[in-house]
Image: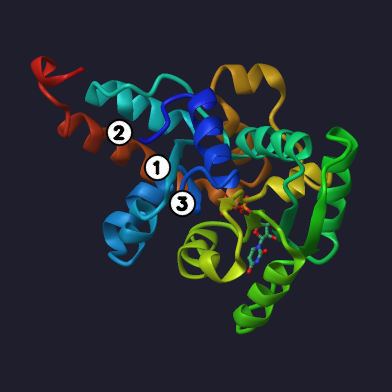
Amino acid sequence: MDAVDAAAALRMACAAAAGERPPMYTVAINPEKVMRARREPSLRPVLEGAGLRVPDGVGVVLASRLRGGRVRERVTGIDLMLAVAEEAARRGWPVYLLGAAPGVAERAADALVRRFPGLRVAGTGDGYFRGRDAEVCERVRRSGARVLFLALGSPAQEYWLSAHLAETGCRLGMGVGGSFDVLAGRTARAPAWMRRLGLEWLHRLLREPARYRRMLVLPVFLLLALAERRPAASRP
Ligand code: UDP
């Protein structure tokens, strides 16, 4: 994991947005993505090509502990997005919100501007544009956006950022999953007490029971982490 805490993740993301390091995209790493990359060879270079991978979810934190790694806290995609939006408002970086159902990105943008007055929204668009990638990239490029928040779900957003970020002209692309739906008030985040206990996944499971299949990978993921455990002597 590149950034082991929220402050480091924000520093790296902002350095890209500011042009102090090459343009890059971020990926929120969770057990589902790691396991999928194991069976889908084309996904691996996409995750590895990210300039920043953040530990999104308690599963990744647990796995890091099992392996003797350094990750100690979650950095959820939506929290990093909010922190970047706050910095964008402060530093005048135009942002583009692309993804989710028609109308949702606009409402998410309004919510962001209410929260961070002065934030410049260069443009918005829904996430149902299959086959029109070139046109969408051109629209983002012409908007002058510096930061692209992309909410297409995973791993579609990761594939898209890896293939098209350069064409959009944005310096920072962030895959933010269902965050627009949360900001627009379409779906609720887990209550604070559940977040503190690392139970965001349980909240999601209760709300969308059909996701249980995706979550079945967690025990396997943790067992693999245990199997790949580094000997104590080689740990930092
Ligand atoms: N979505 C989209 N285009 C698509 C499929 C999905 O914009 O072709 C959006 C969908 O409306 C939702 C988000 O992608 O806002 C998926 O959110 P989810 O929380 O399911 O993301 P995941 O957990 O898969 O990363």
As displayed, is residue 25 above or below residue 102? Answer: above
Q: Residue at x 53, y 31 (%)?
A: 11
Report whether residue 216 is seen. Answer: no
Closer-to-camera residue (121/198): 121
How far, Cα to Cα, is label 2 from label 3? 34 Å
34 sits left or right of 27 in the view: left
Q: Secondary structure at mark 1?
A: helix
Question: Label 3 amino acid?
Answer: Pro
Q: Residue at x 73, y 57 (%)?
A: 96
Q: Earlier in the sequence, mark 2 or mark 3?
A: 3
Viewer-nearest of discs 3 and 1? 3
Tag 1 near tag 2, CB within 8 Å: yes
Q: Secondary structure at mark 3?
A: loop
Residue that badge 2 annotates: 222
Q: Residue at x 80, y 61 (%)?
A: 123
Question: Label 1 amino acid?
Answer: Pro
The label shown at residue 22 is: 3
Report whether residue 109 is seen. Answer: yes
The label shown at residue 40 is: none
Question: Are there few (<14), some (14-19), or many (20+) residues within 10 Å of tag 1?
Answer: many
Q: Earlier in the sequence, mark 3 or mark 1?
A: 3
Tag 2 near tag 3, CB within 8 Å: no
Q: Earlier in the sequence, mark 1 or mark 2?
A: 1
Farthest residue to the bottom: give it. 131
